[in-house]
Image (tube, rainbow, N blue to C red):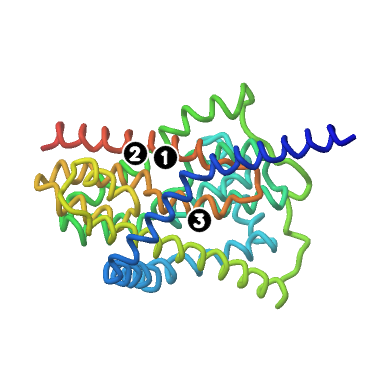
């Protein structure tokens, strides 16, 4: 009996030791970050301020209304009405269900991370299958046209002639990715179909204050999480600026943390406008690791995985950069 107890205790100690070894690199990284924050408090303050202003002035007014209204659409008959209108063309183009067509619409028009949020909400409500959700996440979580035109083209590059090419390329890149991912996720089926009678729904639910309040609170929770990630990654970028020297690896990695600051860094560090534009389109198609973190917080508890998503976004980034390069070679 004593031998059995000792054996169990030894096994538990071994498991704890292995767990500590696995968590050690993460603990070391967090400790280094904490030390950097103590050494450079001014950079932390400036980075947090810039991230907060970006969230308050741009992200909150852009995303929050869409979060509220999409929540209401999923809780009432509005989703059914929209999918009846756009479902046909989108089903034929992307091989999705009628409800999946709404995620495509939100993902291409509303910006990060609305495509992921709508996809996750559709899975949770049983309106689409997990398999369709994985397919949708592979291509329908993108930068909004408003951001592309206002920030990328007009504010950063100041070139009106780049407006249409930027929109076309950043729309075409995820569409091209969908042509490859659908072969894997569809697995020989002609298209995804609505999974249950609930997928036709919301039509039997009535709007009331409780529905509105629930949508409002869920949207507040989501937008606050998005803001937290933006502030954190803005602080990381500010701390990287404090490192001595100008390592090529550091210059290449820093823009990938957050797309808005990353585009500005690309413009500042690449003197050739054409090369900077190609790189900026690639980063915009990827969205940055901050957008990936926002996506992860939206898909928790749905069965969706962030790692295939990151790989697919990197593929979209490569496609966008190549398309931009082809455009320059042909028209410039």
**Residue 17 vs residue 323: left or right?**
right
Disc 3 to disc 2, C-alpha distance:
19 Å
**Residue 263 vs residue 221: left or right?**
left
Mark 1 and mark 2 in contact? Answer it, CB < 8 Å: yes
Say the numbered circle drawn on residue 256: none
- Place of residue 144 in the rendered image (x, y in percent of width and height, measured from the top left): 39, 55
Pick the front one: 99 or 267: 267
Where is mark 2, residue-wise? 317
Q: Secondary structure at mark 2?
A: helix
Pick the front one: 120 or 188: 120
Residue visible at 69% across and 51% down in the picture:
124
Pick the front one: 77 or 232: 232
Disc 3 to disc 1, C-alpha distance:
15 Å
Where is mark 1, residue-wise? 313
Q: Secondary structure at mark 3?
A: helix
Mark 1 Cα-neighbour bin, 10 Å: few <14, some 14–19, many ≥20: many
Looking at this view, name the residue that lies furthest to the top: 188
Q: Quadrant of the N terminus?
A: top right
Looking at this view, name the residue that lies furthest to the bottom: 209
**Residue 108 vs residue 252: left or right?**
right
Find residue 78 and report its image quarter.
Answer: bottom right
Mark 3 Cα-neighbour bin, 10 Å: few <14, some 14–19, many ≥20: many
Q: Secondary structure at mark 1?
A: helix
Disc 1 to disc 2, C-alpha distance:
6 Å
Find residue 55 and report its image quarter.
Answer: bottom left
Pick the front one: 310 or 173: 310
- Place of residue 190 in the rendered image (x, y in percent of width and height, measured from the top left): 62, 26
Where is mark 3, residue-wise? 114
- Place of residue 99 in the rendered image (x, y in percent of width and height, measured from the top left): 63, 47
Residue visible at 72% across and 58% down in the picture:
202
């Amino acid at each position: 009996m004593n031998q059995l107890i000792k054996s169990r205790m030894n096994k538990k100690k071994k498991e704890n030791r292995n767990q500590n070894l696995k968590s050690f690199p993460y603990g070391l990284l967090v400790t280094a970050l904490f030390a950097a924050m103590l050494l450079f408090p001014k950079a932390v303050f400036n980075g947090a301020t810039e991230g907060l202003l970006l969230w308050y002035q741009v992200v909150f007014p852009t995303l929050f209304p869409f979060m509220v209204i999409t929540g209401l659409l999923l809780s009432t008959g509005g989703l059914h009405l929209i999918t009846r209108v756009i479902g046909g063309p989108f089903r034929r183009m992307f091989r999705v269900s009628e409800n999946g067509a709404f995620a495509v619409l939100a993902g291409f028009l509303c910006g990060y991370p609305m495509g992921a949020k709508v996809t996750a909400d559709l899975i949770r409500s049983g309106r689409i299958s997990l398999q369709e959700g994985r397919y949708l996440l592979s291509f329908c979580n993108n930068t909004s046209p408003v951001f592309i035109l206002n920030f990328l083209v007009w504010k950063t590059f100041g070139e009106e002639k780049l407006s249409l090419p930027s929109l076309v390329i950043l729309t075409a890149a995820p569409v091209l990715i969908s042509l490859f991912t659908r072969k894997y996720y569809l697995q020989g089926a002609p298209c995804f179909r609505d999974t249950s009678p609930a997928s036709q729904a919301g039509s039997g639910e009535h709007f009331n204050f409780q529905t509105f309040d629930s949508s409002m609170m869920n949207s507040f929770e989501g937008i606050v999480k998005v803001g937290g990630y933006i502030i954190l990654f803005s602080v990381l970028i500010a701390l990287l600026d404090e490192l001595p020297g100008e390592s090529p690896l550091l210059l290449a990695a820093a823009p990938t943390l957050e797309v808005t600051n990353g585009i500005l860094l690309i413009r500042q560090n690449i003197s050739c406008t054409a090369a900077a534009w190609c790189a900026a389109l690639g980063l915009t198609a990827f969205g940055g690791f901050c957008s990936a973190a926002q996506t992860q917080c939206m898909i928790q508890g749905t069965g969706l995985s962030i790692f295939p998503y990151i790989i697919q976004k990197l593929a979209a980034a490569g496609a966008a950069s190549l398309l931009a390069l082809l455009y320059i070679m042909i028209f410039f």
